[in-house]
Structure formats: structure tokens, C-alpha cells
Amino acid sequence: MVTCGTCGQERIAFETCPFCGASSAPQEPDERGPSDREKSANVPAWEDPEAAFPGNLLQTWRRSVLEPGAFFAGLRFDRSVARPILYYLIISILGAGLLLTWGTILSASSSGFMGQLYELLDPSGVSAVPGPMRSTLLLVNFFLTPFLAVFYLVLWSMLLHFFILILGRQAGPLRATVRAVCYASGPGLFGVVPFVGGLLAYVWVAVLTVIGLREAHGMSTGKALAAFLLAATIAVALLAFTVILIITRGAAGA
């Protein structure tokens, strides 16, 4: 007689318990190592070494932009930030390249419908610059994009993480915030869409950032949104202060 490990009834040594139907065969231990468990995790195509470029970039962009809930819920935030930062830089450079292309094509017509269209497509304000300086500024903006993007990423991530540490009880590390910010940058490409492209890009990036912060740090949506709004308020205030300071010094120098 043997005792069933499931129901506790004594029975003859059958392969299946006649009382509860549980199998008496010994359970094989889970021999998967850490590397096997890591492979089974939800890794974005962009971080999958077996995924080819540019398919991995397009798939990651599509999932992060169109399926943000599922994408960020399954994203591992304890991994390296190298690949997410590279993704962020590619998106930033692509966006600047699209603006440069549109600016080069449309700035040739400084009046009429094409000139008005260029002003609508240009969220950077370069279209307001008259004469040949416009093309120069477009090129400068394009070549400075990687440096400005990294500068923005560092400051914005640190500012967000500061408020996350204040609002979140179990906030994750800074790299979790960086990963969320990088993968939330995809809608920036919508900035070239006429009329509403700039606003659409900013709002969509904000929504993805809140979702990413919520999943990265185990926060509620309300706290993630509060951290974003507080950080954005400080950023706007610092920008306004810098602009006022520059104007004031310029006026004093004149």
C-alpha cells in the first residue's frame, strides 16, 4: 500500500490514484537554467540577437506604438540600456532626417501653397528664418540631433526618476526609467505629419511614457502620470527661465 501525495488516501501502487485521479509518476525537476528562463522572457525584437535589421526595429516600433500596454507589461526593465538607447537615437535621427528632407524639398518655395505647407510641416520653427540661413539651420539641426537627443535623454530620465523615487514606494533603478523613456520615443516620427503631427507626437509619447513608467516601477497609472506632469512642469519652467535669461542679457547688452 502507498499513500497518495495529492489526496492522502492509501491505495495499491497504481499509476493513477483511483480516488482523485492524480498520477503517481515522479515529477521531473525543472532543469532549466537561468539562461533558459531568460530566453523564455518577453524580449523585444530589437534586443533579440537572432532578429535581423531592420525587421527588429520595425517590429519593436510597431508594438511599442500600437500595442503599448502589452509591450511594456512584458518588457524586462532589469536589462542593459545599450540597445534601448541605440533604438532611441535611431528614432531621433530618422525624425530629424524626415524634417530635413521635407525642409529641403518645400523650402525652395518660400511663397504660395508649398511655402505654407512647409510652415505647417515644420515644428522646429526653422521655416520662420528667412533667406539662405534656413537650409543651413536645417543641416545644423540634423547633425546636432544625436548630441541633443542624448542630452535630453539624460536630463529627462533623471528628472522623471527623481519624482518616481518620491511617489513610488518600490521604485526600480534608473535604468528602468531610461528603458521606458527610450521605448516610448517611437511616436516622435509622427512630427512630420501636417497640421497635427507635432501635437500628436508629443501626446502619444507622453502616453507611452506614463505606461512605461507604470510597468517599470510597479506604480499606479495615477502616480506615473503625476511623476510625468511634475517632471514636465519643472522642465518647462527651466526652459522658460533660460529663454528669459537669454533675452534679458541680450537686451542689456544692446
Image (cartoon, rainbow, N blue to C red):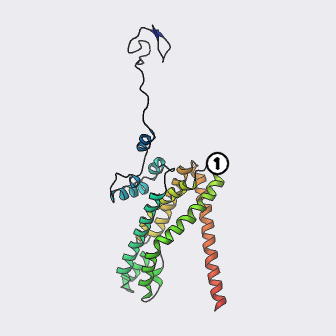
Residue 112: give x, y in percent of width and height.
37, 85
Quarter of the figure that contains the N terminus: top left
Q: Is residue 209 above or below residue 75?
A: below
Instruction: Indicate the quadrant where residue 133 lies.
Output: bottom left
Quarter of the figure that contains the C terminus: bottom right
> Which residue sits furthest bottom?
254
Res 16 visible: yes
Q: Give the crowd class for mark 1: few <14, some 14-19, many >=20 residues within 10 Å.
A: few
Horizontal side, residue 30 vs residue 167: left or right: left
Task: Check disc 1 and report its element: helix, strand or loop.
Answer: loop
Q: Residue at x 48, y 79 (%)?
A: 125
Residue 205: give x, y in percent of width and height.
49, 61
Q: Residue at x 62, y 87 (%)?
A: 250
Q: Is residue 57 above or below residue 235?
A: above
Q: How many marks?
A: 1
Which amino acid type is shown beneath numbered disc 1? Arg
Residue 102: give x, y in percent of width and height.
37, 76
Q: Residue at x 62, y 66 (%)?
A: 233
Horizontal side, residue 22 vs residue 230: left or right: left
Q: Residue at x 42, y 69 (%)?
A: 93
Horizontal side, residue 156 vs residue 62: left or right: right
Res 122 visible: no
Instruction: Indicate the quadrant where residue 197 lies.
Output: bottom left
Instruction: Indicate the quadrant where residue 137 lies.
Output: bottom left
Q: Which residue is mark 1?
A: 169
Residue 148: give x, y in percent of width and height.
50, 71
Residue 76 versus residue 20: which sits nearer the camera? 76
Residue 93 versus residue 167: which sits nearer the camera? 93
